[in-house]
Amino acid sequence: MSTHGRRERERAEREQAIITAARDLALAEGWDAVTTRRLAAEIEYSQPVLYSHFKGKDAIMAAVAVEGFAELATALVSARASAPDPRQAVADVAAAYVAFAQQRPAIYDAMFTLAVDLPFATQDVPTDLARGFAELAETVRPVAGDDDLETVTETFWAGLHGLVTLMRSGRLRRADHDRRLAVLVDRFSR
Amino acid sequence: MSTHGRRERERAEREQAIITAARDLALAEGWDAVTTRRLAAEIEYSQPVLYSHFKGKDAIMAAVAVEGFAELATALVSARASAPDPRQAVADVAAAYVAFAQQRPAIYDAMFTLAVDLPFATQDVPTDLARGFAELAETVRPVAGDDDLETVTETFWAGLHGLVTLMRSGRLRRADHDRRLAVLVDRFSR
DNA sequence: TCCCATATCTAGCACCGCTAGGAAATGGAG
DNA sequence: CTCCATTTCCTAGCGGTGCTAGATATGGGA
């Protein structure tokens, strides 16, 4: 029975290895390249092992998304913390959000585009997602005016999300990205 | 050689049948249900026939997206035309945009989420997309203020797109949809 | 009527996510 | 140390996908 602890620890490590492999592969070659066979080869186990950790490929993507929510929240917190004033905080947090999405497109996809309902079935995703959202709300609060804070925050968030996704799909001119971001920040912080 | 005209016409009809079948199937059961085999069965031809019309499944989706861009543009035009004043026009056009996306989610996906680069390889997509964008720009013009019109339009568009996509993926509370839309319109029309 | 080009289909490839069933490793009991 | 039960893991395979090569049917022109 003494080996039980080690076994469980090794199992947890392997589970993390799966998530990391999926994450890295998705970042490097996109989610299309993330197949269960390649994932299995990456962790040097056979395919069915994946299914003893996750219900399916979607669940693996969801796990990557969970890590992403935590990362994003942290990035937003640090952006707001180092801003000199509330007005600048809005711009800095917005920039941090967009930077996150641009630097980790595959993870951003897992969080918002793919794996639509799965992450919300688990318990910890709302936690990290809520952390990020709360940070956004606190950033927006000083400039929300008379409107309901949560509603304004959601709308501002949608603006960021729209800029990110439209630009990545080539619908917006890349050159004017900063100007669009400035317009969005301006419209939401006065 | 006299049958040549009929042949060509029949071929064009079959091509349209493929697009329509793909569109209807996607609307009814989602894009996952649109397989080349089912599509072939729907038009009562064998699978390879599809590839004599389109390069691949992506090209079929792109064709559906093209129709979607035309539809969307028309909806926006009519929304603006029947608005009593410029201020209301912004709200009405925004509502029309969101309504289009909500009523034809599969087509909206084909236009903006899936088939990322393909539509832009053809010639007519920019035309219909530009029509929609131009309509959006004319709507925004009276309330753009000192900012560059195109930049403001793109940003406003991103706001709409973000609201649509985030809400459909369950990230936003459904109940507050109208209030968010009102906030967005308000921030962009004063 | 025959020929040939075109149009179309059958059959199959390589890949996908996923799973059943058997082999191998492991840990406790005698 | 041996034996057995349990857990762990892999091999093999199922039904599906997008796509294509090669064979077959079709129909107009000589």
Image (cartoon, coloured by chain):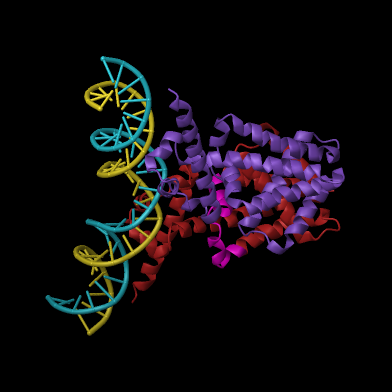
Chain colours: A purple, B red, C cyan, D yellow
| Residue under the point 74% across and 56% down | B153
Across and down, in percent, residue B128 comes to 61, 61
Q: Is residue B88 left or right of residue A5?
A: right
| Residue under the point 55% across and 61% down | B117
Q: Is residue B150 visible?
A: yes
The reply to whether the magenta stretch includes residue B108 is yes
Above or below, A77 relative to C7: above
The residue lying toward the viewer, choosing from C26 and B82, is: C26
Across and down, in percent, residue B62 comes to 51, 58
Above or below, B120 relative to A182: below
| Residue under the point 42% across and 56% down | B18
Magenta stretch, main secondary structure class: helix
The reply to whether the magenta stretch includes residue B84 is no
Bounds of the magenta span?
B105-126
The residue lying toward the viewer, choosing from B100 and B2, is: B100
Across and down, in percent, residue B116 comes to 55, 57
Q: Is residue B189 visible?
A: no
Across and down, in percent, residue B181 comes to 73, 41
The residue lying toward the viewer, choosing from A95 and B103, is: A95
Q: Is residue B92 left or right of residue A118?
A: right
Above or below, A128 relative to A104: above
The quarter holding residue B119 reads bottom right
| Residue under the point 77% across and 50% down | A184
* Image quarter of the N terminus of chain B: bottom left
